[in-house]
Image (cartoon, helix red, strand yellow):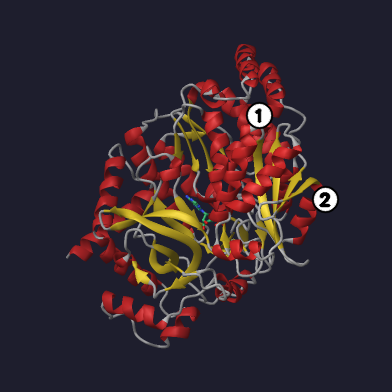
Amino acid sequence: MLLRSLQRLMEAAQVVTSNGNADGDYQYEIISWFDSVSKNAAMVQTETLGQILHLNYGVEYLKKWFGDMKIQDMDACALESLYASLVPLASHADFEPFIQRIADGDTAPILTQQPITTLSLSSGTTEGRQKLLPFTRHSSQTTLHIYRLAAAYRSRVYPIREGGRILEFIYSSKQLKTKGGLTAGTATTHYYASEEFNIKQEKTKSFTCSPQEVIFGVAYKQSTYCHLLLGLLFWDEVELIASTFAYSIVQAFATFEEQWEEICSDIKDGTLSSRITLPRMRKAVLDIISPSPCLASQIEAICRDSKASNWYGIVPRLWPNAKYVYSIMTGSMQPYLKKLKHYAASLPLVSADYGSTEGWIGVNLDPCLPPEDVNFAVIPTFSYFEFIPLNKKKQDLTSGTVGYIEDEPVPLSQVKIGQEYELVLTTFTGLYRYRLGDVVEVAGFHNGTPKLNFIFRRELILTVNIDKNTENDLQLAVERGSEVLNKYGGELVDFTSHAEVMHQPGHYMIYWEIKGEVEERVLGECCGVMDASFVDHGYVVSRRTSSIGPLELCIVETGTFNKVLDYFIGNGAALGQFKTPRCTNNHILLRILNLCTIKRFHSTAYN
Ligand code: AMP
């Protein structure tokens, strides 16, 4: 009985999402829907797995493990335990040959019964290589669904005016055709091109400032200029400023600092800078703009004044009706938070939800929380989630693994507060017991569903020999070092790292792009502080015994990280999904970084 009503709830949510049959009570409905599924999260998960397996019964991948076993009549709970016992945990590498066949045009039911016609490219900036992943209508529907769920929670605290606009720094990637004729692009690109993106705008009655031609320009510098120009033109209608990842907003305002005079001149005369060369983008923007000399001089006055205070609080000054800034600010976006706070001043920052190209995971139910403290309530209807318990090793310095002992995966209903886990997904798009590689910690529960803190991605590890430092450890060390930099008036723009093992002894290299004039003595101090901030036992022991050499700080010239961005964009990434790789072994990237290095410092922390 309960199962049937849950099923109805799940279907109801899908109908609202796909058909857009929402009315004024939608926010109330979606919140009570989430209350209901989260109260019954364990059962909903069992059901969700059952649905995925029934939908994809007989596909090649599942046949490998289930053989000809008839699962249709099986009880959902029995199927859940059978699934965990027969189907192994897998990584992207295990799915790659299957996905490649789909990309090459094999239309047999390989991963899903419904043919897959679209593939997503992950940002590729986390593992250094873009991954191809299946994308289906379900993917767009869940994007719309989580967007509206999160919007319902946000509007309780920060209501926005209907009919207002969103200044969204969003960008599509190139859309490629695979050998088999399938469209491949970033997941966000597919979403912006989907019906769901339009439904979202119509039903939330909030419209993005830029037309499709700007979002789909695939020339991110031109798109950024137009986003800013149109955002200013609609200044009084803008209710919020948003992007997928915080990096794009910081990047956009760095552009604004450089190009505001040109933008103002375009607003004054109703013209468009010759920077915009794409004919479709030019036409679409010129169709919207008209001369607005009064507005231009107001903006100019604000900019002149703000420039004097290093652009502090420029966002609320230009968009006084904006209620908040909305973007992913956690994980690898944390280093941009300081700059974002600087631009936003008193305007609240709301950290956006947790997802991946593989699938959406959790929603931020507490928009008031500062971005540093935000967590994500798992949505139990989106995928079937398992959690691999990770326990830190007690100084097992000889092991080649990442410093964790892994226990058997547990279902969502068995996770414990305070425990760290690696996430495993079984999705409607054909991934089965797929290790996502993200480490999360259970912060608490919303009804029966866990709320997760994002900790870091597992693969990103700096290691020379017995040392193991994660993205988080690196971030902490860089934070310590940049505190020294800030004290002397410098500002860290971006950073990455590399474990140099070609020469003995190996050592860590940290690349910094900085702003402001800072004495060499200070940079030397920053270098030493970072070296001393890696507290991993393996690292400390190796540094003391000199089996790891002194940490090297490489200062790169201004604009180097824009070259890094351009390199990724040239390879099919999109600015909207871009994350600076925090640790790289990529030869081309290292060549860019080394060619751009203007100063080097070696730590004396262990002398
Ligand atoms: P992509 O490679 O573009 O699919 O990026 C997905 C990855 O971005 C996830 O697996 C996480 O590592 C990271 N990510 C996504 N959302 C968040 C978030 N809200 N907080 C922190 N990291 C996130």
Occupied quadrant, residue 100: bottom right
Q: Is residue 516 left or right of residue 134?
A: right
Mark 2 residue element: helix
Could you tell me the amino acid type at mark 2?
Answer: Leu
Nearer to the camera, 411 or 357: 411
Could you tell me the amino acid type at mark 1?
Answer: Phe
Q: Earlier in the sequence, mark 1 or mark 2?
A: 1
Q: Position of residue 405 (x, y in %)?
A: 45, 72
Q: Position of residue 571 (x, y in %)?
A: 71, 56
Q: Which residue is mark 2?
A: 595
Q: Are marks 1 and 2 in contact (CB under 8 Å)?
A: no
Which of the two discs, 1 and 2, sits closer to the camera? 2
Give the numbered dot on residue 378: none
Identify which residue is drawn at 32% across, 63% down. Answer: 416
Furthest residue to the front?
607
Q: Is residue 379 shown above or below 415? A: above
- Check the picture and name the quadrant holding the C terminus: bottom right
Identify which residue is drawn at 76% across, 36% down. Answer: 277
Q: Position of residue 201 (x, y in %)?
A: 46, 39
Q: Position of residue 411 (x, y in %)?
A: 34, 69
Q: From the Cβ of disc 1, is ligand 1 less than 8 Å away?
A: no
Local packing at callout 1 (Cα closer than 10 Å; few below 14, some 14-19, many 20+) is some
Q: CA distance from mark 1 to mark 2?
A: 27 Å
Q: Which residue is mark 1?
A: 256
Furthest residue to the left?
1
